[in-house]
Image (cartoon, helix red, strand yellow):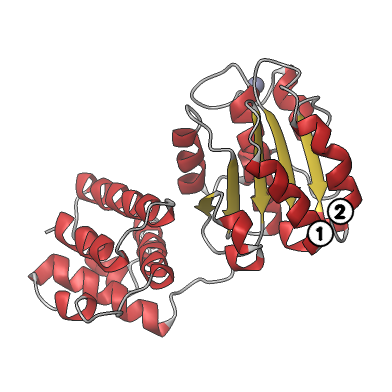
Amino acid sequence: MSGIVDPIQALAGQQEAVRRLDALACDPPQSIVVEGGTADERVALALYWAMRLNCKAVPTPCGVCSACRQIVDLAFSDLLFFDGREGLIKVDSVRETRPVWGQPPNGDGYRVTIFAEAQQFMTESANALLKSLEEPRPGNVFVLAAPQRERLLETLVSRSWVVTMAWPDIRTNTPEIAEWTAALAGFWRSGRGWFERTSPKGAVDKALALQVVLGMQRELRECLKGETSSPVAGALASFDLAGLRRVDLVLCQAQEALNTQVPVNPALVLDWVATRMV
Ligand SMILES: [Zn+2]
């Protein structure tokens, strides 16, 4: 199997996503979409989820018990791993597995089925999986890992909880997002220059709001590393550590709100972020 490393180590730079999964573990959603990060990070996060749901150690999996080690080796009896990194995920293999998903797991944790690079689904495979998602069986959960949710069948995404990892290739925000993060940091300082951005009807859709939140998290990471060369990271540096923790929490809560299936007004979520820190 290619590219499997210790998930806990591989996720050192993705602690926000790990925290999000930890928070979900007490009541695991039937299906999670993992997007963002690199392909290896997505696999690591999916395996971390399997460990989290099957290791007896709390709040973080131990990485050394037999369940944890078998999961890393892809040899755990309640782990099914479909690897889209090796080519198309074919409908036959999904159909053959459907009876298994109708059974309770072998152990006392969860049966976790991972589709790595799930954008490699043949449409028929995606539809076969959809049937299983429509007939949920207790103890069976699914992870669909893909670069972006847009590359998956919309009907699969709409049945899933989306966890977004930090995007890998972008060191700095795009000019559009940088304008938004600068406006947010400016509003935190002066209390001005924000609502005229969010109030026009249709000014903020969900994708933009999520990019602004992720862009702000990126600036926060830079600031915490002591990198304050960007104006926004420099502005964040005027908060004390407690203030920065609050920024982190507010951004995480906003991201969660934007990722739930419950319809939210994305402009109001951004306004909430803006006003929480003033
Ligand atoms: Zn363990």
Cα gap from disc 2 to disc 1, whole angstroms: 6 Å
State the residue at coordinates (49%, 45%). Answer: 15
Mark sitting on residue 193 = none
Q: Residue at x 40, y 65 (%)?
A: 210
Do labels 2 and 1 touch, CB within 8 Å?
Answer: yes
Could you tell me the amino acid type at mark 1? Glu
Q: In which quarter of the image is residue 191?
A: bottom left
- For badge 2, the amino acid type reads Val
Q: What is the quadrant of the C terminus in the image?
A: bottom left
Secondary-structure class at tag 1: helix
Q: Nearer the viewer, residue 3 or 104?
A: 104
Residue 91: which disc?
2
Residue 147, percent from left and from top: 64, 63
Q: Where is residue 170 in the image (x, y as percent from the top left)?
A: 53, 72
Residue 106 shown left or right of residue 266 in the figure? right
Vertical comparison of 178 with 66: above or below: below
Quadrant of picture, ligand 1: top right
Q: Name the residue under label 1.
A: 124
